[in-house]
Structure formats: structure tokens, C-alpha cells
Image: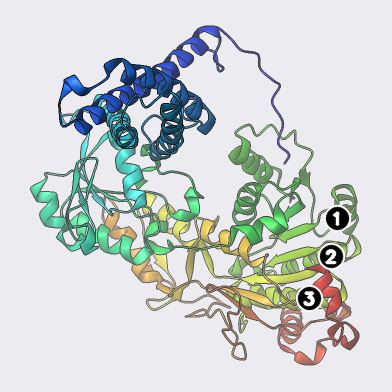
């Protein structure tokens, strides 16, 4: 998608206009002039106070005329210095730390100039009084700003008789932002009454008058003491373990539990009242802090032409949303599902008119159509997320896995090579590690094909492997929620089955980071944390249901494992570039070997050949000429 620039607007004089007209401009100028006038009066008062103090309080020793004359000159100098530093140009909010810093700089400029002028005028006031007046004026002007800000905050503070009484867990930056947002909105539905934080250094801390009442383990006692209705987890970096612990403590107190979004959803913006939401199962299972290198990501996405295949799916659509934040020159969204493209455009620009030239309806099985798309849009970076992913269906229809996952990916890779794509990221799955299913075989083959493509051209081609994504279409949480809504039962394959979980935002955040790493056709394996027992997830959902919901165990389906692994038996967990991303070498597979696969072959025969291609190292292709010449890769990087 491309950003459309808005037409320039003229100033308007109506109260509802977006831009200030003459009346609004007059009000703004008057307000800034008032600030300058208050600061001038503070300087005059400071000069008088300092001079009187210099003469030990003897007013008859004070040259009032000289003080007033120097104060008038000082007001002019201070105003000019303030304009120069941005103090009176509306650059900062009134009374903020940045404005106080500018006020100090202005005073630091004004005092030496007054010192020189006083000497030229014949010593109107004692020199020590001039130096002292700078400090006194700074205190007076800052005091006025504090008083004004305090008055404004008191006026905006919501009534304590309205809204839910909230105990806020956390006293860091996220909690500070959300407490200020709640107390600076007269219509806020929340009234913070206490804070909880485990840091002993914050035991006496108050945020806008809201005190830290103890550590998080004191939550039941604090909720009772302050008669709270809501517990708000205001720690954007909180992991799933902490959210589960706090949620269990709060529910035992029969109070609502709310959270602020994780860091990955905030993407650097300030936390506000509108961000407060109920705890979701994604918060309880997959939430964790993900640190990324913004500069490295911007280096390969900003100003580049980016293509995302499978853009209408769960992973592809989130890729589009996150890539768009890095201002690519062009973001091409490709999918064969027009409804999916409509949904992703609607989520990004709120219009969903399907009128953007970069929305591309195409099937990766169609080689001619792929060539048309690459020729027209000339992508420099490709995220390949298009795939079939439902394990039981592919067990029944392995020919479809061949056509889409294997041949479709091979065509994308070869088209990217022909059109000079600089970087390609192939989305894989943990089913490809020590595969035992059609889905696993097909994705392992694509990992090997990607490694071969990396050797065949100057670009950087890699795969990214991760486990189950919460909130995606067909995810276990979505299925369980639908079963609970229908009254049950919740079906679980085995009491001990476990899976890795990560939210779609967290997974894509790491995928985008992985794309920036220096890789030689490797599989980049995302750290998914600890596996979660599916039965525990089902039990939590059943307990939260309004009516009794039973859990039924159905047995493992063909191709399913009791426990998934992110690494094959011969793969090592090596993390040279990022603490949450492992880089695993992959034996490349030459595309000519795909001629052994026939979608029309009997199901068992096709699966056997797919397994052989996924596991056999004998079909890897060595390219000593390229391996011995790393300079081409360094030039490409």
C-alpha cells in the first residue's frame, strides 16, 4: 500500500475547523505573550528580592529605579532568549520537563547578558544580586508553571464517586502513563486507588497521589483495604506466567482483571485509557517481551518494495500491518482469497474499498501469474506466508500439500531468483523439525528448497520456523472458544499433549527481526518459550465458562505427535545474533528432485516420496563455486 498525501488545507475561522483561523491564532499568541509576561514579572521580582537580600533587608539602600530599569531590560532579553530556545513558540506543553529545561537555558543566557549591561549602565544593582536573581527567577517561573499544571490536573481529575476503583499492578513507565491517562480524563471509567510493585525502592512512591501499597503478593489485602473493583496489570512487558499468577490472585478476590497491551502491540506509543482491556487467553498463554533491533529492520524494509504472499491469512495480514510501520516504498499484498485481502486492507486503512493497485489476487500455483506480479511490482523483499497448514486435512489430501506448499513455494523461490529479489523469508513450522506428517514433510522440503535458492543467487534467502500461533484462523483457542460457546464438550486429543504457543503479533515481530539477520540459507528458529499442556488450556476455558462444560479426549490423529519439537535430532540450538532466534544450517535440495513427486500417485506412495525428500541428505546439492566465494554475499548484504 502507498500513503496518499492529503491536499493542503487553508486556515479556517470556524470553531470546528481543523486548523486555527485568525481568532484561534489570536488566542494562541495571547497565551504565549502571557507566559512571557509572567516570566518577565518573575525576573523583576527576583531582581528586587535578590537586591533586598544583598542589602540585608534595608529597603532604603535599594535603588528601586535602577532595579526597575534593569528589570525592564532583563524582560526584553529574557523574552528574546526564550523565543530563540522555543520557550514561547509552543514547542512544548506548559509545565513539562522539556519546557523547564528550556526555561533554565533561557535564564542561563539572560543572567550573563544582564551582568554585562549592568556594568555598562553604571552598576544599577549589586552584581551578586544579578547572579542570585537568575536562580530566584527560575524557581518563581517554575513554581507558577507547577501551580498552573496542578490546577489543570485537579480540574480534569474524575470524580471519585464515579467509575471503578482500580488497583494498578506495576509502578513503572507503563503504569505511570496509564495512571496519568485515567486521572487526566474527567470521563474516565477508572479511578486508580493504589499501586503494587515488587521493587523495594518504590515502597514510598506515589504517582499523581496514588501510593504504592505493597508488593504483588499483597494484592488480596490491598483490594480489600481500598475496596477495589478492578485489578489492572499495567506492565506492558509482563510475560504469560506473571499474567496467569496475577489473574489467579485477582479472581480469588472476586474482582475484574484488566491488562494494558503488551509491548509488541503498543509499538512505542503511549498507553492510554482506551488501551485497557480484559485479559485474553492469548495474554495467559503466549504473551512475552520481544526485543527487536529497529535500526536493522528499518535498514532492509524502509523505502523498499515489499511483497507478502498469503497476505489475507493470519500470519500474512499481521506481517503487512507490521511491515507498513517501517514505511516501505511499496507494500504488495498477494493472496488468492479476495475476502482475506479485503479484511487486511480494512484493518490497515479503515476503508476496505479494494481500490489499491498493490492488492494482488493471485495463486502461487500459477507460474505465469507470479511472473506477471514480479515483473510489474519488482519486489526487493519477499515474505512468503502462503501455505496450507491444517495437518489432518493434508494427511487426507497430500497432493494438495505438494501443489501449494512444495511446488508453489518452489515457484515463488525461482521467480524471486529470476527477478533479483534481495531478501526472501519463507515461513515454516515446528512440524518441519523431525517431521512425521504430510504437513511436516512438505514444510521441511520448502526449508531445503529455500537453502538451495540462497546458494543459487546473490540474495539472502532463509526460512523461519515457529510453533502454534494464538488467534490465527483454526488455532486451538479459536476451536475451544467455539466449543464453549456451543455448550461443549471441549475436545482434546490426549491428556498429555503439549504445544508451543506464541501470539501472532509476537511471532511476526520476530519474523521481521529474523529477516534482518545475516543468514546463509539457514532455518531461523524462534524461541517459543516452554510448551503448554493443551488439557490445561481446555480446563481454564471450561472453568471460565458460565455453565458447566465437559472435556472429552479423542485420541491423537494420524500424523500428530504427543509433543512437538522446534529442532530436529541433528540440529543444534545456536544463537549467534539474537537471544530469541536460533540459526540452524539446512542441507539444500535441488529443485530437479521434485520430479519424483506426482500428485496423481497413490496416497501412500506420494507420502513415502515426500518423507524421503524431507529426510535424505543424499539429495542435497553442493555448489562449491558459490560456497568458496563469500564476497558476493557480503556485497549483497
The answer to whether 234 is drawn above or below residue 496 in the figure is above
Front-most of residues 397 and 293: 293
**Residue at x 80% of width, y 57% of height:** 380
Element class at badge 1: helix
Q: Quadrant of residue 292?
A: bottom right
Element class at badge 3: helix
| Tag 2–tag 3 contact (CB < 8 Å) | no
Q: Position of residue 128 (x, y in %)?
A: 30, 37
The answer to whether 572 is drawn above or below residue 598 in the figure is below
Question: What residue is shown with label 3?
Answer: 449
Front-most of residues 95 and 556: 95
**Residue at x 28% of width, y 30% of height:** 140
Residue 411 tag number: 2
Sequence-wise, the earlier of marks 1 and 2 is 1
Q: Quadrant of residue 507?
A: bottom right
Of all residues shown, which one is farthest toward the left?
225
Element class at badge 2: helix
Q: CA distance from mark 1 to mark 2?
A: 8 Å
In the shown orientation, is residue 229 left or right of residue 282?
Answer: left
Q: Position of residue 470 (x, y in %)?
A: 49, 59
| Tag 1–tag 2 contact (CB < 8 Å) | yes
Q: CA distance from mark 2 to mark 3?
A: 10 Å
**Residue at x 71% of width, y 22% of height:** 7
Q: Position of residue 227 (x, y in %)?
A: 11, 44
Instruction: Report if residue 368 is visible in the image.
Output: yes
Question: What residue is shown with label 1?
Answer: 370
Q: Quadrant of residue 314?
A: bottom right
Amino acid at each position: 500500500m502507498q500513503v496518499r498525501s492529503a491536499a493542503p488545507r487553508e486556515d479556517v475561522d470556524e470553531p470546528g475547523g481543523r486548523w486555527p483561523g485568525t481568532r484561534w491564532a489570536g488566542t494562541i499568541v495571547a497565551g504565549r505573550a502571557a507566559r512571557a509576561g509572567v516570566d518577565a514579572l518573575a525576573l523583576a521580582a527576583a531582581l528586587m528580592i535578590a537586591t533586598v537580600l544583598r542589602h540585608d533587608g534595608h529597603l532604603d539602600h535599594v535603588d528601586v529605579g535602577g532595579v526597575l530599569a534593569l528589570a525592564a531590560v532583563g524582560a526584553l532579553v529574557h523574552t528574546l532568549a526564550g523565543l530563540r530556545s522555543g520557550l514561547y513558540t509552543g514547542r512544548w506543553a506548559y509545565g513539562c520537563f522539556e519546557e523547564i529545561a528550556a526555561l533554565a537555558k533561557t535564564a542561563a543566557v539572560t543572567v550573563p547578558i544582564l551582568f554585562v549591561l549592568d556594568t555598562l549602565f553604571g552598576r544599577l544593582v549589586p552584581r551578586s544580586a544579578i547572579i542570585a536573581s537568575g536562580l530566584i527567577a527560575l524557581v518563581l517561573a517554575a513554581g507558577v508553571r507547577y501551580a498552573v499544571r496542578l490546577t489543570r490536573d485537579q480540574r480534569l481529575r474524575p470524580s471519585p464517586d464515579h467509575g471503578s476503583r482500580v488497583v494498578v499492578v506495576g509502578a513503572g513507565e507503563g503504569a505511570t502513563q496509564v495512571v496519568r491517562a485515567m486521572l487526566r480524563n474527567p470521563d474516565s471509567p477508572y479511578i486508580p486507588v493504589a499501586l503494587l510493585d515488587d521493587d523495594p525502592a518504590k515502597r514510598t512512591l506515589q504517582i499523581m497521589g496514588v501510593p504504592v501499597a505493597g508488593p504483588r503478593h499483597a494484592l488480596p489485602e490491598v483490594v480489600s483495604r481500598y475496596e477495589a473493583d478492578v485489578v489492572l496489570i499495567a506492565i506492558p512487558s509482563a510475560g504469560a506466567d506473571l499474567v496467569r499468577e496475577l489473574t489467579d490472585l485477582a479472581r480469588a478476590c472476586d474482582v475484574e482483571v484488566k491488562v494494558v497491551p503488551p509491548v509488541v502491540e503498543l509499538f512505542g506509543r503511549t498507553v492510554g485509557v482506551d488501551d485497557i482491556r480484559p485479559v485474553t487467553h492469548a495474554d495467559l498463554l503466549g504473551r512475552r517481551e520481544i526485543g527487536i533491533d529497529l535500526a536493522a529492520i528499518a535498514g532492509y524494509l524502509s523505502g523498499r518494495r515489499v511483497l507478502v504472499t498469503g497476505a489475507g491469512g493470519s500470519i500474512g495480514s499481521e506481517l503487512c500491518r507490521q511491515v507498513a510501520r517501517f514505511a516501505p516504498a511499496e507494500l504488495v499484498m498477494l493472496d488468492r482469497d479476495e475476502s482475506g485481502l479485503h479484511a487486511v486492507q480494512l484493518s490497515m486503512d479503515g476503508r476496505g474499498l479494494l481500490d489499491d493497485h498493490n492488492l494482488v489476487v493471485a495463486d502461487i500455483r500459477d507460474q505465469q501469474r507470479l511472473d506477471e506480479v514480479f515483473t510489474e511490482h519488482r519486489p526487493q523483499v519477499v515474505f512468503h506466508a502462503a501455505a496450507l497448514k491444517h495437518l489432518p486435512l493434508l494427511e487426507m489430501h497430500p497432493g494438495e500439500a505438494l501443489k501449494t506448499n512444495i511446488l508453489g513455494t518452489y515457484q515463488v523461490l525461482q521467480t524471486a531468483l529470476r527477478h533479483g529479489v534481495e531478501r526472501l523469508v519463507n515461513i515454516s513450522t515446528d512440524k518441519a523439525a523431525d517431521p512425521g506428517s504430510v504437513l511436516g514433510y512438505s514444510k521441511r522440503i520448502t526449508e531445503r528448497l529455500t537453502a538451495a535458492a540462497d546458494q543459487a543467487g546473490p540474495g539472502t534467502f532463509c526460512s523461519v520456523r515457529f510453533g502454534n500461533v494464538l488467534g490465527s484462523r483454526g488455532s486451538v483457542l479459536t476451536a475451544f472458544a467455539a466449543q464453549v460457546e456451543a455448550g461443549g464438550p471441549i475436545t482434546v486429543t490426549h491428556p498429555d499433549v503439549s504445544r508451543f504457543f506464541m501470539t501472532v503479533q509476537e511471532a511476526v515481530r520476530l519474523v521481521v527481526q529474523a529477516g534482518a539477520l545475516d543468514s546463509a540459507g539457514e532455518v531461523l528458529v524462534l524461541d517459543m518459550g516452554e510448551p503448554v499442556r493443551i488439557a490445561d488450556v481446555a480446563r481454564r476455558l471450561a472453568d471460565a465458562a458460565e455453565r458447566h462444560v465437559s472435556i472429552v479426549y479423542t485420541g491423537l490423529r494420524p500424523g500428530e505427535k504427543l509433543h512437538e519439537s522446534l529442532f530436529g535430532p541433528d540440529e543444534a540450538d545456536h544463537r549467534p545474533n539474537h537471544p530469541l532466534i536460533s540459526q540452524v544450517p539446512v542441507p539444500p535440495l535441488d529443485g530437479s528432485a521434485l520430479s519424483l513427486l506426482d500428485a496423481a500417485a497413490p496416497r501412500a506412495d506420494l507420502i513415502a516420496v515426500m518423507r524421503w525428500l524431507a529426510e535424505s541428505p543424499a539429495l542435497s546439492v553442493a555448489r562449491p563455486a558459490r560456497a568458496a566465494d563469500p564476497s558476493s554475499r557480503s556485497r549483497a548484504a
